[in-house]
Image (tube, rainbow, N blue to C red):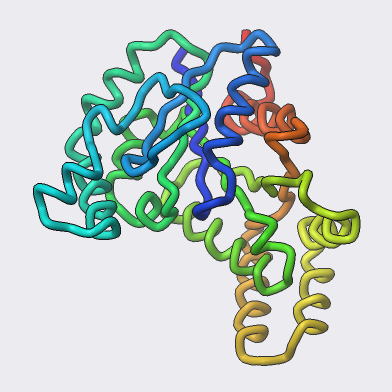
Amino acid sequence: MAPKNLLFIGTAGSGKSTLTYAFQLWMQNQGYDSITVNLDPGVEELMYSPDVDVRDWIELSEIMESHGLGPNGAQIAAADLMALNIKEITDVIDGFDTDYVLIDTPGQLELFAFRASSRLLVEALGIENSALAFLFDPALAKTPNGYVSSLMLSATVHFRLPVPMMSLMSKSDLLGDADRERLESWSRDYYSLFTSLMDESNDTQTVVSIEFLQALESIGLGRGVIPVSADSGEGLDDIYSMAQQMLEGGEDIG
């Protein structure tokens, strides 16, 4: 049976690498096998040792030196270079006998979501065996407009990569009781979010946010954000259950 691929995606600082590591440890404790894949060529330190590391093919410092680019330009070039190495990278991944492939995507969300290499990677791994885990950063999402901005980003990623997606509220242990209750309410009930948007302000940005929410509601996106924490372990079992539901119809790993 082909392994299942779970790609952790989110804005810089949302906790992708930390959650990737925490979820791998959780899986090990449950008796499930998984490998980790680092797709960020610019990362300097990771708390885990990736089984497959894009830095074995692409070094950001070398790109900067050989092409005379700054850090941002080098990241764009690296994203495009990854497309040229997709076959080699996926061949290495395919060499592992494992249940899950946990993929830690680049810190700059737009470099993964909007470059051709991301879709090529998912297609090479197998669309039918892949799912996305989009991380909402509570530092942004705890205000109404910030929450809607996160919904916009997650919807854009979902449209770009046509595979099942779960929405996770990362770093849930940092949320106070009031913030947690409010975020859970917004996640369950769009009307609650509409009301909070109107209470926050009544400017052009709010009007745009409300129109966007209405569009999301009409197509059923953005519901059910799961609180998770790499530190406390909250929600890690929910990630597994959701992934199994999306990729195996709820059946546990045999």
Q: Where is residue 72 drawn, in percent x and y?
A: 29, 59
Would residue 71 be found to the left or right of residue 45 on screen?
Answer: left
Q: Which quarter of the figure has residue 32?
A: top right
Q: Residue at x 68, y 25 (%)?
A: 250
**Residue 182 versus residue 13 in the image, above or below:** below
Would residue 83 be found to the left or right of residue 186 on screen?
Answer: left
The residue lying toward the viewer, choosing from 68 and 153, is 68
Q: How many marks?
A: 0
Q: Where is residue 70 drawn, in percent x and y?
A: 23, 59
Q: Residue at x 62, y 31 (%)?
A: 243
Q: Where is residue 100 drawn, in percent x and y?
A: 52, 20
Would residue 123 be found to the left or right of residue 45 on screen?
Answer: left
The residue lying toward the viewer, choosing from 148 and 14, is 14
In the picture, the quarter occupied by the C terminus is top right
Q: Residue furthest bottom?
A: 203
**Residue 59 versus residue 98 in the image, above or below:** below
The residue lying toward the viewer, choosing from 13 and 116, is 13
Q: Residue at x 41, y 45 (%)?
A: 106
Q: Residue at x 29, y 40 (%)?
A: 120
Q: Where is residue 241 drawn, in percent x and y?
A: 70, 28
